[in-house]
Image (cartoon, grey):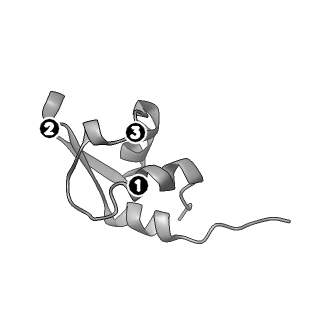
Amino acid sequence: MMPANHREQQLMQHLRGGAWVKAITLPPSPKLIANLVDKGWIEQRGIGAELSYRITKEGLAAKKARVRIYS
């Protein structure tokens, strides 16, 4: 599994509780959110003002995966 990059981890940090979070409370990053949905790391429900997101088991695993650091 590919680990989440820094921006992905930051956004998923908002969703770490596992409950549905209203889109309006998340940072405005539509492309990043769309990429996370495409990867299956977060899921969405609702439309308009009711749009919400939550982290999936796969997203939690990607968030916790170790990132290799090259020196």
Q: Can see residue 55?
A: yes
Tag 3: residue type?
Answer: Pro
Secondary element at image label 1 = helix
Identify the mark nearer the N-term, 2 or 3.
3
Q: Residue at x 20, y 53 (%)?
A: 20
Which residue is the extreme one toward the right? 71
Residue 70 position (above or below residue 14):
below
**Residue 26 location in percent, x, y?**
34, 42
Residue 63, numbered label: none
Nearer to the camera, 42 or 21: 21
Residue 12, numbered label: 1
Check disc 1: other Cα within 10 Å, few if <14, some if 14-19, many if 20+. many
Q: Is residue 15 left or right of residue 8?
A: left
Tag 2: residue type?
Answer: Gly
Q: Residue at x 53, y 57 (%)?
A: 4
Q: Residue at x 15, y 30 (%)?
A: 49
Residue 46, numbered label: 2
Which residue is the extreme one toward the top? 48
Q: CA distance from mark 3 to mark 1?
A: 11 Å
**Residue 7 location in percent, x, y?**
54, 48
Q: Residue at x 46, y 38 (%)?
A: 32
Secondary element at image label 2 = loop
Q: Quadrant of the C terminus?
A: bottom right
Check disc 2: other Cα within 10 Å, few if <14, some if 14-19, many if 20+. few
Instruction: Tell me whether circle 2 and circle 3 mark residues in contact (CB < 8 Å).
Output: no
Q: CA distance from mark 2 to mark 3?
A: 18 Å
Q: Is residue 31 left or right of residue 7?
A: left
**Residue 23 location in percent, x, y?**
26, 39
Which residue is the extreme one toward the front? 25
Residue hosting label 3: 27
Check disc 3: other Cα within 10 Å, few if <14, some if 14-19, many if 20+. few
Identify the mark nearer the N-term, 3 or 1.
1
